[in-house]
Image (cartoon, rainbow, N blue to C red):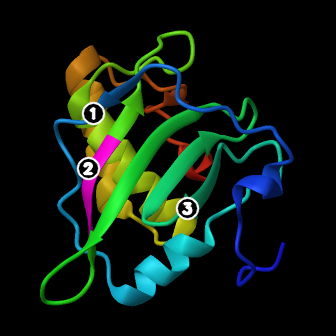
Amino acid sequence: MPADERVTRSTFSGRIRPISVPRPMPQLPQRIWSDEDWERIQRGYSSRDMDEKWNIFTEGEVAFLHRSWTGRGIFAATFAPVDHGGWQIARAVVERDPKRYRSTDDDYDCLMLELVISAIVLGEPATDLRARLVELTHQKSGSADASAGGCSTARWDCARISR
């Protein structure tokens, strides 16, 4: 699919499953996305192969982030315009069914939401976000080889979490 073509729910031919146990996220990314970023976010992202983990599409001002293999919804983030330009996440929900999404950590979820949007949709290197995710995962587990939602922090090929 060309990068400028908009991804929609119908792009995924019924493979999209809603969040089954939505929980409002108490922590949200504080980033202000530019108007150009918001335009790109609205175009969404469709994984190109089996190694990519996320599909993203928007409806209105809500960005839906789904796992590519299962189609399960993990995040739904509502964007709102900021007074002096740009867009910010005003509210979001995260999946809390442990059979669908293993994380129960608010810091991790906030960081993951921002990382997926920044690295996947916008194609940014997001080096600082990736480093914070590794650090957070290490702190929570006490191990440099702990799993972060399926990613080994020791080898950090979590470009795959995002791509």
Residue lying at 55% horizontally and 66% vertically, measured from the top left:
121
Amino acid carrying label 2: it is Arg
| Upstream in sequence: badge 3 or badge 1 | 1
Q: Secondary structure at mark 2?
A: strand
The residue lying at 20 percent from left, 25 percent from top is 139
**For residue 109, which quarter of the picture?**
top left
Quadrant of res 115: bottom left
Q: Are marks 1 and 2 in contact (CB under 8 Å)?
A: yes
Distance from the alpha carbon under mark 2 to that under mark 3: 15 Å
| Numbered label attached to residue 91 | 2
Which numbered marker is on residue 24? Answer: 1
Of all residues, the one furthest to the front in this rendering is 60
Element on which disc 1 rests: strand
Q: Is residue 17 magenta?
A: no
Q: Position of residue 132 (x, y in %)?
A: 26, 47
Residue 126, numbered label: none
Mark 3 neighbour class, 10 Å CA radius: few under 14, some 14 to 19, many 20 or more:
few
Q: Which residues are magenta?
A: 88-92
Which residue appears at 27% of the width and 33% of the height?
A: 24
Q: Is residue 99 visible?
A: yes
Q: Amino acid at mark 1?
A: Pro
Residue at the outermost top position: 99
The quarter of the displayed image where residue 58 is located: bottom right
84, above or below 49, in the image = below
Looking at the image, is mark 1 or mark 2 earlier in the sequence?
Answer: 1
Query: What residue would you read off at disc 3?
Result: 59
